[in-house]
Amino acid sequence: MSLAAEDIRFIREHLGEWLAEQSLGKLPAVYEIELRERILRVEEELKHQRELLKTILEQMDKRFGAVDKRFETLQNEMNWRFEGLTSRIDRLMMWSYATTLTVGGLVVIRTQAVCGLESKNRPPERRGQIDQAHAAAVQAPL
């Protein structure tokens, strides 16, 4: 169904009127002014929203900065505690090492003293037998 040239001309002539009637009886110029006012209000609201977003982002940056400082403080405190713990463990290790060497030295001295006294207290004929048995045990292959 194609439109005749006369129909197209009629539509063009009356289109503005029909649109004006659809906009609740307002003239096209009034409708255009109303649209511009609406656009200005929307732009102002968008500007306000942008400012709100900017302030919110600034507040978030401040909060993140405070959290970063707190984490840094906690990290420094943990480092200080670990250094203290490390020094305590080092002292314990030194004390343990010194105690082990001292006890080991005392055991060796006591063993030599006891063995030395035993060999002196043995009768002369037994001294040779024990010394030979000991030398054989030391020289025996494993």
Image: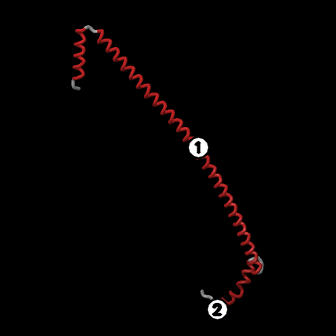
Q: Position of residue 142 (x, y in %)?
A: 23, 26
Q: Quadrant of residue 103?
A: top left
Q: Residue at x 34, y 14 (%)?
A: 114
Which numbered marker is on residue 5?
Answer: 2
- Mark 2 residue crowding within 10 angstroms, few (<14) / some (14–19) / many (20+): few
In the rendered image, which residue does mark 1 sit on?
74
Task: Give percent across and percent down for residue 61.
Answer: 64, 55
Q: Which mark is residue 109?
A: none
Q: CB of mark 2 within 8 Å of CB of mark 1? A: no
Disc with the residue nearer the chain's start (2 vs 1): 2
What amino acid is at disc 2?
Answer: Ala
In the picture, measured across the screen, residue 11 lies left or right of residue 100, that is right
Q: Is residue 90 above or below residue 137?
A: below
Name the secondary structure under disc 1.
helix
Q: Out of 54 and 5, give the one closest to the viewer.
A: 54
Q: Is residue 32 left or right of residue 106?
A: right
The part of the image, by quadrant, that contains residue 134 is top left
